[in-house]
Amino acid sequence: MGAVRAGEVSSRILTVPNLLSFLRLALVPVFLALIIQGQDALALLVLVISSVTDFLDGLIARTFRQVSRLGQLLDPAADRLFIFAALIGLAVREVIPWWLFVVIVSRDAMLIVLGIVLANHGFGPLPVHHLGKVATLCLFYALPILMLGEAFPTASWLTDPIGWAFAIWGAFLYWWAGVVYLVETVRVIQIPRVEVGSGSDTLDG
């Protein structure tokens, strides 16, 4: 198989970026176990390793034209799982309230339902909205910052307000993006679909 041209997405599975993504996924249960055990410093170290591999797999994929469909699925999946692991671990230890876990997980449950609705109407998933990206970034910063305060209590006077600011804004933007996806899903499934010469369905306009 020849090299993937710039901008092209391949169907390859065994690529270096994908192997790094699988490594990130394998680190998720380790990360969760460390948080539940109260080993926050080690959990943060695992998160740093995960972030480095995330940066490297993106860099390698772009530089050596190894962007793949699988990789486009694994990267956001790993990010979501790290967030969920941190939420579960910190909620079990009562560092964060369970309502925050429910708020975040329920929005993703809604997105799963929306994805099923779109698929039943013959459409693929909606493009990621910038609000969703910002919300995920806020949560990805909030939870490690809160963990930092648990690992180093003398710094909690600073880390706790910052971490909670990111967490509250992240949860708010997470649901704001969810409402945007809901509205867009309703709009898309109401658009008339036309048959083209190849027999495939496309959006009208």
Image (tube, rainbow, N blue to C red):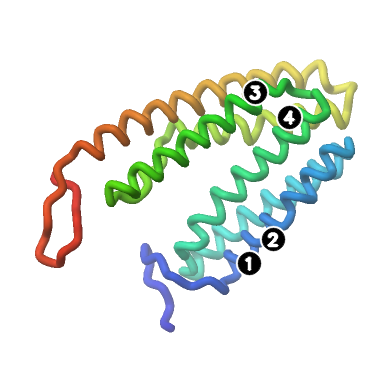
Please report contact status of discs 2 and 3: CB closer than 8 Å, yes or no: no
Disc 2, SS? helix
Question: Where, by quadrant of the figure, is residue 166 drawn?
Answer: top right
Residue type at mark 1: give it: Leu
Please report contact status of discs 1 and 3: CB closer than 8 Å, yes or no: no
Q: Nearer the viewer, mark 1 or mark 4?
A: 1
Mark 2 to mark 4: distance in Å? 23 Å
Mark 1 to mark 3: distance in Å? 32 Å
- Residue at the bottom extreme of this rendering: 1
Residue type at mark 4: give it: Ile
Q: Which residue corresponds to mark 3?
A: 100
Disc 4, SS? helix
Mark 2 to mark 3: distance in Å? 28 Å
Please report contact status of discs 3 and 4: CB closer than 8 Å, yes or no: no
Q: Which residue corresponds to mark 4?
A: 145
On screen, residue 94 above or below 199: above
Left or right of 16 on screen, residue 146 = right
Question: Where, by quadrant of the figure, is residue 57 drawn?
Answer: bottom right
Q: Which residue corresponds to mark 2?
A: 23
Please report contact status of discs 2 and 1: CB closer than 8 Å, yes or no: yes
Q: Nearer the viewer, mark 1 or mark 3?
A: 3
Mark 3 to mark 4: distance in Å? 16 Å
Disc 3, SS? helix
Residue type at mark 2: give it: Leu
Q: Earlier in the sequence, mark 2 or mark 3?
A: 2
Q: Earlier in the sequence, mark 1 or mark 4?
A: 1
Mark 1 to mark 4: distance in Å? 28 Å
Residue type at mark 3: give it: Leu
Residue occupying the point 84% across, 37% down: 36
Mark 2 to mark 1: distance in Å? 6 Å
Disc 1, SS? helix
